[in-house]
Image: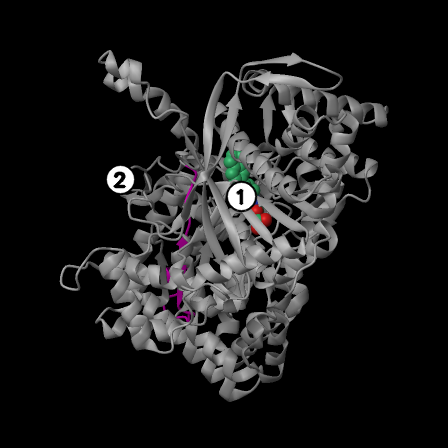
Amino acid sequence: MNFRHAVSRPADADELADAVLNHLTFSIGKTTDTATLSDWRLALTHAIRDMVVAPWFDSVRQVYKEDRKRVYYLSMEFLIGRLLEDAIDNLGLGELARHAMEKHGIDWREVLDDEPDAALGNGGLGRLAACFLDSMSTVGLPAHGYGIRYDHGLFRQGFHDGWQVEEAEEWLRQAHPWEFQRREVQHRIGFGGSVRTTEGDAAEWEPEEVVIAAAYDTPVPGWGGRWTNTLRLWSAKPERLFELDRFNRGDFVGAAAPAILAQTISRVLYPDDTTPQGKELRLKQEYFFTAASIRDLLRRFVSDHKDLRELPNKVAIQLNDTHPAIAVAELVRLLIDRHGMSFDEAFEISRGTLHYTNHTLMPEALERWSWDLMSRVLPRHLQIIEKINRRHEQEFPDRPESTRIIDHGEIRMGNLAFVGSCKVNGVSALHTDLMKRTVFKDLHELHPERIVNVTNGVTPRRWINTCNGRLRDLLNETVGEGWITDLDKLERLRGHATQKSFQDALWDAKRINKASLSNWMLEHTGVGVDPDAMFDVQIKRIHEYKRQLLNILEAAALYNEIRDNPGKDWTPRVKLFGGKAAPGYQQAKLIIKLINDIGKKINEDPAIGDKLKIVFPPNYNVSMAERLIPAADLSEQISTAGMEASGTGNMKLSMNGALTVGTLDGANVEIREAVGPENIFIFGKTADEVNAMRDKGYDSRPAIEADERLARVITQIERGVFSPDDPGRFRAIGDTLRHHDWFMVTADFTSYWTVQRRIDDAWKDRRDWLRKSTINIAGMGRFSSDRSIKNYADYVWEAEYGF
Ligand code: 26V
């Protein structure tokens, strides 16, 4: 480091405390008497940020010098959560920082909890992108994340009388010192207008409307601060702040109207991850950030390379789902219209550079844009997409209909991404296999080398080291600290799985986490729970395929059973739910209300006491996950087999010692392999069985008739036992279960009930439970996102990493 003012690691807590005080005074402009908790947090953030900046410059300079291949991760969502504690831990300053703040009389936990979550994502896909950023820096891979700087992230969830209500989220209301606005980095992004053909393949696109993409950079320091990458988020700004002539004419509001319109592009994150509604604004968001990113990376490439044909050797672009798939057309367009290449050459180079990850097979979630909309918003891109489609057809004259990019007046973005990419990957072994057999079957036959698997992973920095200090300490004592960057080292725990002292320490760590979660829940939900009960956790977006309904039906059936046999030796359970429903997803919202209504009835029944409790704290987000996961005993991963592409919560929970109850779906299959079938509770139909049953036309009646418990619960729900104020409230749920049970809740109920009772018994053998729990932690090495990133680097990007 050769910066005169580079801030190095503080020698001790006093030095850091001084740095914080300095910032409180000179950056925040407050005295210690007037400073609020947020002021202190901002001062600490500035002090930590100072230590990140010089190594960040070092990393940037090193990539330029070595000219290594760079990776660009394009994602509509980055669900990064809070950044302060993560940065402190990555720099190894945890203890020091805590002491420094204590010297100022500031409570450490309180100051960390004051930071708002950056909720720039919906769920799994966005959180995966955030874990990948952490891992790319930690393994020393030169990379940029590119996304959108939404003014409002995912909505805040509240419950009114048990119903979900949504409120706007305002994470930028407070200063956000992690980002650096790059005023000099701006790209003009056009929409609409007309196209004039010029020479050969080239054309000139005259957009009708232009917005500016303005860059905001956030440093992403990896473990130990050895390498720092950049997350660059784009904010939409008007070309002109307001129309002066309108203003002068006295039209004060109208003068600002065009500016407001431009800004709407990056105003809100779309909260629906179930059905793309073909909304124009969504298409504009997608093009906005994709075009800005492609232009940005091309400019960087051209600044130090002569030959654009070298692009595939120096650049890999990863498309996180189809949301940035318009990149295929944009890159080809720029190579033709701006750099004078022929269509064929442009397509070859583009295809060598782009890669596409698929995250869902659900047909309704696959993006399609109407030809009309595309021709209105992106006329030049539509021409190029048509050309790509024709070229593919010429190459494969007998190609089946399913491989068309344009079909029935719609652009299928999955097919565009597939045809325009070098590698296409699924996110778990099962999901990749299903891609080859279902949605991309025909394209896979035409391009048999293209699909590869890269199983998802999660960062052990955030998901063990930072969120579970007690487990972290125990792991450090038992296997040394190397696991943080080499999670396979956890294998060494296997030798301790039956060791009493280790088991006791593991139990104690979990017990303390559970006790502190109990206090937090009492404060936030008013429900008191016994920390000695089994904490049974289902945390994820509310979707029918994820089957929160199966879980709550089982809870209601258990409630009946406990009431019928109060004297039996029941295993006390706390069922914890967390998750948001898309605002327009009525059935998911009704399931939330059902969970809350059933929960209320159970929690208020004195005959039940601590044997069963239901807790559903509102507004599940990354920081709530950081509280819940370390306290979980049982992890619910119960999706209809074949529908959850991977899941990543399953990995986080198992890493923290929870045992999984799950179907053979997504990465659960690989978790079973890693921990052994005796250390996981698998139940339910397999993906092939589900498909066969659907093909025949599934009728739920026999399953309901065969299981008295199930029949009774469905009838109770239909008769309003859980909703006496409105007995018909849950009719839609009864109807679904009886007449169109697409997600096979009834088909899997009996086997779910049975496995849950086995789990009750397993809990009673505490020693064996702890052995299983240890083996789960030990087996999670392969689910580190460091492994995922190395797989991408080796098999997809062909990029070097390391120091
Ligand atoms: C889909 C859509 C549809 C269009 C409107 C906006 C929108 C936003 C997000 C999504 C995401 C659906 C795909 C998704 O999140 N998949 C999840 O990806 C995780 C990471 O690979 C994986 O673990 C989950 O199993 C999978 O459901």
Q: Can residue 638 be seen in this view?
A: yes
CA neighbours of label 2 inside 10 A, class few (<14), some (14 to 19), many (20+): few
Span shown in magenta? 559-582
Tell me how far mark 2 sits from mark 1, CA to CA.
Answer: 49 Å
Residue occupying image coordinates x 78% and y 39% = 444
Foreground: disc 2 or disc 1: 1
Mark 2 — residue? 725
Q: Is residue 531 visible?
A: no
CA neighbours of label 1 inside 10 A, class few (<14), some (14 to 19), many (20+): many
Left or right for 743, reference 250: right
Q: Is residue 561 magenta?
A: yes
- Dots 2, 1 in contact, CB < 8 A: no
For ligand 1, the image quadrant comes to: top right
Q: What residue type is labelled 2?
A: Asp
Q: Tell me: residue 801, above or below residue 315.
A: below
Q: Position of residue 235 (x, y in %)?
A: 43, 36
Q: Tell me: residue 367, above or below residue 19.
A: above
